[in-house]
Image (tube, rainbow, N blue to C red):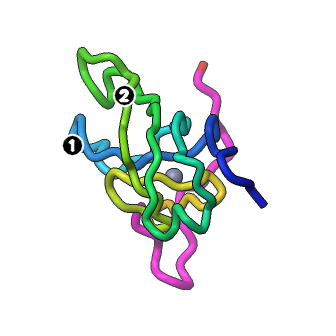
Amino acid sequence: MRSLGDLNGSHVHYVVQDGREDVHGECRPAFIVQDWGQTRAALAAGAAVNLIVLRDGDTDLPGRTPVQWETSREYASAHEFATWHFPEECQVTVAAPPAGEAPEGESGDSSHG
Ligand SMILES: [Zn+2]
């Protein structure tokens, strides 16, 4: 159980809503820099935090500094633009195969020369 104020410095995910179109909705690592002394329950009820978000360089923001400050961002356990969640709550929202179908092309070979 987290206590009051100790979310400062927590590693979370931020759901981006800017930059290149193909990165909209992607999670990027972020750190809470101001949690306003809230508990998880308070955050879930709509309280907000300030975050420093680490972006994926030119993939996300061509020609711009890949670090951004986001203020008064709300927690959402669902994957919504411009909200944040804890990594263990991350919901991958890419299209999943229909129930009963196994994904194809899975391979453990990750050699890249
Ligand atoms: Zn995530």
In the depicted view, which residue is nearer to us: 55 or 85? 85
Q: Secondary structure at mark 1?
A: helix
Numbered badge on residue 31: none
The quarter of the image holding the C terminus is: top right
Q: Which residue is mark 2?
A: 68
Mark 1 CB lies closer than 8 A to ligand 1: no
Residue type, numbered disc 1: Glu
Q: Nearer the viewer, mark 1 or mark 2?
A: 2
Residue at 54% across / 39% down in the picture?
32
**How far across and down, in percent of the image, does residue 8 sit?**
62, 38
Circle 2: element type: strand
Q: Which secondary structure class fits the magenta region best? A: loop
* Left or right: where 107 falls relative to 57: right
Does 110 sit above or below residue 49? above
Q: Nearer the viewer, residue 59 or 52?
A: 52
- Structural distance between the alpha carbons of marks 1 and 2: 17 Å
Residue 105 magenta? yes
Task: Name, please, the residue furthest toward the bottom.
Answer: 100
Highlighted magenta segment, given as a residue range = 94-112
1 or 2: tag closer to the N-terminus: 1
Q: Which residue is mark 1?
A: 21
Q: Tag 2: residue type?
A: Gln
Label 2 lies in ligand 1 vicinity (Cβ under 8 Å): no
Residue at (63, 49) in percent of width and height: 107
On the image, the x and y values in percent for residue 71 come to 36, 40
Residue in the picture at 46% in, 52% down: 84
Q: Quadrant of the N terminus?
A: bottom right
Instruction: Give whichever of 61, 50 is nearer the camera.
Output: 50
Instruction: Please report contact status of discs 1 and 2: CB closer than 8 Å, yes or no.
Output: no
